[in-house]
Amino acid sequence: MGRQDRRLWALTLAVCVLAGSSVALAVTRLALPNANLWMYPVTAATLIAVGNACSVEVPVRSGVRLTLAPTAIFVSAVVLPAPWLVLATVVGVSIAKIITRYPTSAAVHKAIHNTAKDTVAATAVGAAVGVAGVHPDLGSEVLPATVPSYLVALALSVLALVLVEETVTTTTVSVATGRAWRTVASTAVDLRLAVVLAEFVVAAVSIALVKVDLRLMIAMPLAMLLVYAVYNHRMWLRAERETWQRLAGVTDTLSTADPTDVLLTAVRGAVGLFGARHAEVEVTLPAAGRRLVRACPTCVCFDGPPDGVPPLERADVVQPLTTGNADSGAVRIVLHGPRDVLSGREKAALRAFGAALSTSLDNAVAHARLAADARMYAHLATRDGLTGLAGRRAFTATAGPRCADRSADVGVLRLRLVGFAGIAATLGHAAGDLLLVEVATRLKRAVAVAGYLTCRLGVDEFAVLLTGKTSVAMESESLRIAEALRRPADAGGVLVGVQIGIGLAVGAGVGIEELLGRADAALRRGGGNASVRLAVYDRLEDHQDGEPQLAELVHDLPADLRAGRLHVEFQPVLDLTTGVPVAIEAVASWQHPRHGAREAQCWCGIAESVVPPVSITQVVLDEALAGVTAWRDAGFDLPVVVTVSAPCLLDARFTGLLFGSLLRHDVAPDRLILQIPETDLLGPGALVETLTEVDKAGVLLALERFGAGPASLATLATLPIRGLKVDETFIDSMASRHSAVVIRAAVTLGGDLGIPVCAPGVRSHEQRQALRDLGCRVGEGDLLGPAMELDQLLIALGRGVNGVPGQLAAALEEVRVLPLRSRPAS
């Protein structure tokens, strides 16, 4: 027998001693009633039995029960003398306990205890009635006193019974459940006081009725059953409402994105919701492993890995948890003793609590993954995935404020890997990637001491922001950095020479985009040639013949875009053999009001700093699709090719703009070919979702500048590409063996994939014939048809060549071609 059980038996023994004394005293003073009044002790015993059997626990699992026995005792006290009241109570309570209790040791113990307690309470009530001057007599007059006397007696009886009930019951529940005496005493105190008041009122009304006609007492057991039914139902509704309200309050607080907050809130909520002595939640979280959080009513006792933590002394209730479709842990609850068990309603609430906790953990884990992904993508957006250097946007965002300072010179150094495209084409893109990583690593080392900001600008180009030095010192720094990169490097087991072209621009209070443009101008003016030690930007040279720098002109673009000065010309894409067009490419052109036409390839790259790329694409798309409608109406069913950049594809508005334009111009999706530069696809994973959506809608996708970037094969494996256009530099230098190898490889790859390969920049018959001999079927360029206005294109299509409408160039068999000669080996 445990300490708790010993204390309970000691308390029961004390109450039984008091009850036994009361019964003994009652027997010694017992007077037999008249023969016709025996019905009243019997009715009183029945009334007390019914009242005691009709009990409700408030609140559920508090250990405190409210019964109708007090009302029965109050009514019986004004009808029966005190000795008979005590005996009627003993008999009535005993009958009730025999009916309502199972014959177990715990139930017998509780029945004995409650019978003794009610006997003591009846003795106290009988004494209070006597103190009030009311002395019922079953030998003569049953109700001898006046109504006011009965009310006084009833009030004293209530006080006496409440004193006994609250003292004995509260102490018993405290010992049995382990709760503090004050906690038990304050449990549902408002409800208990309301019940005492109701008992007083019901007893007063009952006494008044019995005073009118004593025989009405016989009907009181039935009336008490009806009162109990109503009372029990109301208590059930209240408990139901409070349970689910508390559950809703706890589950609402679980709606947080942090798994730690979810677990802490859950374990505290379980303690409060189920009145637990201890509660713990143990889960296995992805990437975080096993975790245990344990709490008591006053604090969180433990939070961390469960290894080595002593288990709870017992777990009265265990609710499994599931995350996803697998078991991930459990909620364990320790109640206040073996007699403290969850009700059916609380078990249902626990299941709902477990489901809500599992869902909240799922959501919190998913949110944590999304947050981690967002951080990763944010890092990738600012960092080049291959080299780890900053990307262009991060570079310009960081360098911008430094460049705005007019008090000191700032330099931008651009470095270009000369001949990188040929190395990647010859040795493979994996070798090209290794070379880029090696150059980037050398660049980081070269600037580590000075702490210069570096970035990867493009496929084969890097930039460094030089600060804290004079312009002369910046030139020396530029040469030092370039020399650090020029040593031969291992590219996939092959030692290759590293040739670097460098351009430097220095200025104070000049925007970063302007400095980048100037450094690029210097690099181009040096020809990007590795033999030029350093090309420094010279403003006078860059404004020859009054021609302004594009980085300055581009700031006029927003106004010109609104004024409609951006328009589209159309260049035919022909079958190299027949000269018949297979598509028409839309070429954007900017008509500057003072400086004339500007081709898109010159200004698109830097235009993103002043105009959202999607705004330019919208203009080009509308004019291109209007062109499709025009030549379709003229009898020529040809698709149009529109170039879009990666920033445009990543704009959330792009797909809506695209599909809206197709609808507006009534053009079938397969009459539009979207052309994406390979150099924009350094990280093609970010574009897959948009391009897949576009492809599913029926729009065709093509890759241009194929061979100029390191992502070609990965891109073809990832994206739904329907056509290739090789980089124009390979066409310009196709007499060289390297370029011919690249073109032939592209044609072979296209043939294996079942997609056409286009050669841009075809300027001579020799190039056309050589491309055809290499297996290339499609091309475009000045030889095959320059970019022209829409009305000129329609006239050319209608007129045709040699009287054949739709043919824009003579067939290859009709052209006499001299073979290309390879340049002698140096």
Image: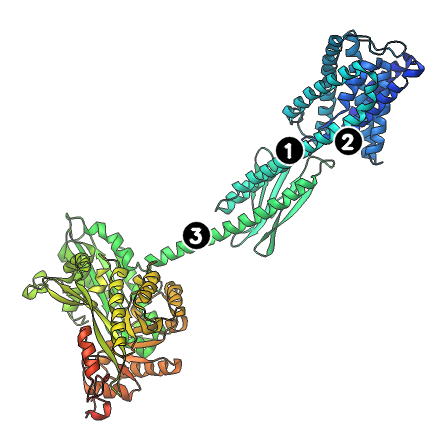
Which residue is label 1 attached to?
Answer: 238
Q: Residue at x 26, y 66 (%)?
A: 622
Residue 525, can we see it? yes
Q: On the rendered image, what quadrant is the C terminus found in? A: bottom left
Residue 614 figure quarter: bottom left
Mark 1 or mark 3: which comes first in sequence? 1
Instruction: Give residue 482's position: percent from left, percent from top.
Output: 22, 65
Instruction: Give residue 47's position: percent from left, percent from top.
Output: 82, 24
Which residue is label 2 attached to?
Answer: 5
Residue 495 figure quarter: bottom left
Mark 1 or mark 2: which comes first in sequence? 2
Q: On the rendered image, what quadrant is the N terminus found in? A: top right
Mark 3 or mark 2: which comes first in sequence? 2
Q: Identify the element where label 1 is drawn.
A: helix
For residue 760, above or below residue 566: below
Left or right, 624 with respect to 655, comes to: left
Which residue is label 3 attached to?
Answer: 371
**Amino acid type of disc 3?**
Ala
Labels 1, 3: front one: 1
**Amino acid type of disc 1?**
Arg
Q: Residues within 10 Å of mark 3 (few under 14, many from 20)?
A: few
